[in-house]
Image: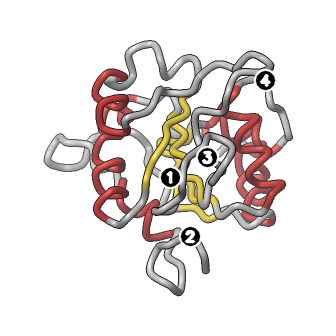
Amino acid sequence: MNDQGETRGRPFLYVVVCAAGVAAGVGELLTAARERGWETGVFATPTAMNGFFDADAVRERTGRPIRSAWRSPGDPRPFPPPDAVVVAPATFNTINKWAAGIADTLALGTLCEAAGLGVPIAVLPCVGEALAAHPAYRESLRRLAGMGVRFGEPYSGEPAADGHPEFAWERALDLLAFPDAGTGNG
């Protein structure tokens, strides 16, 4: 049993959602994670909670509240500890603050803590070309990679040739591949 009084069966995946237009598709990641045997809990940056995704649909899909604000002392933890973390979409702001150790939101605090605990973390950046060229961003990617964070290909947020943006949600899960098929125990 964990500190929520639950018996753990499936591995638990924290999904951190940042404020980018593609965040509306986070349900694709949640569905793929469930199909691969993960239970999920979603953390969102405060700005992402302002209409960047369908919060009601996410709550229904996970069966859990979305975490965006710190809990009060004495309140129970609504999620068990993570077996892995996915940050998708990961914005310029979140990546840079996280690499600098800034934990001024619950999402960032969770990422800083998970990295410190050695929890496997996969990131799908969603950063425009101009911001991706910024020296601070490039240094942040190097710092996080040095901490063991696994990165998918950057996504600029620009539509593909057919006019529809392609965001590789399932790639985040591929980055978390463990020798024992995604159980989080490898």
In depth, the one of 29 and 8 nearer the eye is: 8
Residue at the disc numbered 3: 80
Res 184 label: 2
Front-most of residues 4 and 42:
4
Dot 3 falls on a residue whose secondary structure is: loop
Label 1 and label 4: CA atoms lie apart by: 21 Å
Colour option used: secondary structure
Q: Is residue 147 left or right of residue 126?
A: right
Q: Which residue is mark 4?
A: 104
Task: Give amino acid for label 1.
Answer: Leu
Closer to the chain start, of discs 2 and 4, is: 4
Q: Quadrant of residue 137?
A: top right
- The answer for how far apart the CA atoms under marks 1 and 2 are is 19 Å
- The answer to which of marks 3 and 1 sits earlier in the sequence is 3
Q: Residues within 10 Å of mark 1 (few under 14, many from 20)?
A: many
Which residue occupies the extreme left position in the image? 162
Q: As drawn, is 160 to the left or to the right of 107?
A: left
- The mark closer to the camera, 1 or 2, is 2
Task: Judge by depth and name the residue closer to the eye, 95 or 32.
Answer: 32
Which circle marks residue 124 in the picture? 1
30 in relation to 24, above or below: below
